[in-house]
Image (cartoon, coloured by chain):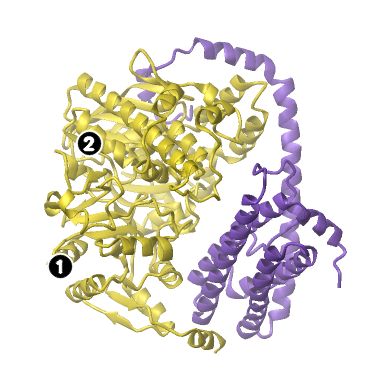
Chain colours: A yellow, B purple
Amino acid sequence: MKILGISAHYHDSAAALLVDGLPVAAVQEERLSRRKNDAAFPLAAAEWCLESAGLEPEGLDAVVFYGRPMLKFERILTTALRAWPQGRSAFTHAMKNSLGEKVWVRGLIQANLGVPAKKILFTEHHQSHAAAAFLTAPTDAAAILTADGVGEWATLTVGRGRRTPGGATSIELLREVRWPHSLGMLYSTFTAYLGFAVNEGEYKVMGLASYGTPRFADEVRKVVRRTADGAFALDLGYFEFHTTVRRAYSKRFMDAFGPPRASWDPIDLATEDGRRYADIAASVQLVLEEILVELAASLHHETGLPDLCFGGGVALNGVANARVLRESGFSRLFVPPAPGDAGCALGAALYADRIHFGQPDRPLPDHPFWGPEADGAELARIAGEDGLPVEELGDAALIARTVQDLTAGRIVGWMEGASELGPRALGHRSILAAPHSAETRDRLNRDIKYREEFRPFAPIVPAELAEDYFELPPGGLRLARFMSGVFPVKPQWRAALAAVTHVDGTARLQALERAMAPRLHDLLMAYGKASGVPVLLNTSFNLAGEPIVNRVVEGYSTFRRCGIDVLAAGGARVEKRVRTKVQAEAELDA
Amino acid sequence: MRSPLSAIHWLAWRNPKRRAENLLRFAEVEADGGRDLVRAAEVTRDPLLRRLFLKHALDEQRHADLFRRRGVALIRALPDRSASAVQAQWLTPGERGLDDLRVEDEGDEALLAFLHLSEKQAARDFKNYVAVLGADAATRAVFEKVLHDETFHMTYTRNQLLRVAPERAGARIWTARLRRFWKAYLRLAAALAGLIGALILTLQFFLVLPPFALLARRAAKKEPLGWAPIAPERNGPLERQY
């Protein structure tokens, strides 16, 4: 069967194509449209998926949308009604927004892809998250936990999944916490309060938390209370996200935590306000972890299963994930590379294939590389046109050359193979650097990523050597496969890994198995041989406000606009030429 | 020559808080424009245009930084840092960049013509702002720096248009001019439609919704907090949207 999964309209829209039960292509719309967090209907992504498989839309057996739009509309309308007579602006905004496009998904898919209505299916949002988490994980039976801002009504679900190799699959969601009580909204509200963009700045809150002490934890526990049945509920007096589009938090929230940070105001941890922001971040992080650990521990007790699959945007919180793994009783924790809405495109398609159509289970390739390929010849052409010397090298020579670059302190843009699905660069669209000195970190922040000083960079290490450098709990290696957990760097290595060790001595590492990205693995080993430490700094190949690069031309334009020294794509390598201002102007005048 | 709108400009820039907000908004617009130019550089097959678009994109990024820094400095000097009650962004258009042009769908000629007009308009606006910023030397200096670059942008886009389309340059500029008018009309029409829509929805909110609101609130009171079981039929057929 050929099934196209689609996620759209809220954030991170994406398309994923399944052929005979296996993914063949998946990409986020933002990687093609070049608009970060693009939420538009993913027409370019769908077309690319079909084209890469040589399919026409009429060849599809089904198109599956990752949510039930009418149910979502019901929730939006009911929320507005419950807030009456407050919430006029939220009502007008939501109606214009929903009635403009978002509720007419069936017609939209028909119009854009020419697929007949009877082939268009809808999963529930959290079913898509559950399927993306469970059906991509190498396990036959697992407990399932999904948590995000909100789907239709559910904000968090628990359940279990079971599959028989070559046989039937079941995903049973047992219970849910319903809107407006949401861990995702809790964290996003603090994100907005701390002056960061919602659905984008949550990483920053997590990074900032390490600088603070959770002295506001009791206040946060008043904002999100535990219910007698072991779930949680928000005290809505602290929030306004359900009544207005203007602000997520209320005056009472500000009375409790002080004035919010303006987005333009840099965080200075030497000031009282800066420390307060860090303490608030630490407090909400702690409370989130506590709740997740308790929910997971109770689910473990209930199901008796050793594995937990965790999906939804909240599963991007690597610090919380590591605590869940350590403290909930589960032996293994599976978080997919795209646990957020982008991954729902794949989840929806898998759910339809295995559950709706009852297709037999097939093990999925355990990697995130489903996007467009990087073409080294394209780099050679463009750089050649700009008069930059291009080297075209075989794998071994490229690795040797890159090791030289890295040991010389150069920063390398690294593109190979298909791009990743999900928010993290896992080795195919990465910026790589030596991990040893804090100066490298500062240079990356200052000249390349243009981002806040308190945000850490992640290390990448061969999986078989990860435990030499990092303190991994049982199951930690699996969680580190897609950079989904934050773990302590071994104290004796912290100085040698200063660029990737966060202020609290931890790192969000990726443990790379050779089978997943052989050439990058070889590079790590070769770098280890040259430097004594087979670890590199690995950060996503993009600039602030831009999506991760996709095609080589985007990698090249990024390389030209920032302090990256070397760009390697496929077998091609380009190094930045040091030019005088006069030379550069003469070139442009020519 | 003094702009006939100088009184409006003076009004729009007089208040330091609004001045700061305008500058922060300009910073966002310049950064967005820079990203559009990066896209233009990625899409073009002309190597010289690629280099020029990238340089232009870097300039826009620098302008964004200049505007942001000055805006932040002004806000920091204010006794009251809250946002202005009156938003009058239409009084002070910044650079429009490529408007809502889809860069991928345009050829080099159309992009150059569009950019040329946009830079020309921005240069004119910025000159007007400089004229009314008499007392604020630091903000004036920012505009003067930006203005210097805008002049280069205006010139290179014109020269490149003449290079890539020597015989069609004039026609391209006129087409771009008409498209800008059309886009301005669309923006106005969309704003008007939005206003009418908001008015109708507001009337509905207060006149039609109250009985339903009452029912919804009563229902909400009955909803228990905490876990809600998921009925097995929820895992049923995927054909329905609700």
Question: As rendered, which of A353 and B66 lies closer to the eye?
Answer: B66
Q: Is residue B127 left or right of residue A125?
A: right
- The residue wearing badge 2 is A333
Q: Quadrant of residue B180?
A: bottom right
Residue A434 is at least partly visible in this image: yes
Quadrant, the N terminus of chain A: top left
Q: Secondary structure at mark 2?
A: strand
Is B4 placed above or below A41 here?
below
Quarter of the image for residue A239 reads top right
Mark 2 crowdedness (10 Å alpha carbons): few <14, some 14-19, many ≥20: many
Q: Nearer the viewer, mark 2 or mark 1?
A: 1
Residue density around tag 1, few if under 14, some if 14–19, many if 20 or more, within 10 Å: some
Q: Nearer the viewer, residue A445 or B160?
A: A445
- Please give the count of numbered marks on the rendered protein: 2
The amino acid type found where label 1 is placed reads Ala
- In this view, B60 is above or below A233: below
Which is nearer the N-term, disc 2 or disc 1? 2
Q: Residue B22 placed where, x, y %?
A: 68, 54
Q: Pointer 1: what residue?
A: A526
The image position of residue B113, as x and y in percent, is 67, 73
Of residues A83 and A63, which is closer to you in this image? A83
Answer with left or right where residue A571 lies relative to residue A89: left
Calculate the distance from the C-alpha at mark 2 to the C-alpha at mark 1: 31 Å
Residue type beneath disc 2? Leu
Name the residue located 71 percent from the left edge and 74 percent from the top edge: B173
Residue A512, horizontal then vertical, whole percent? 19, 54
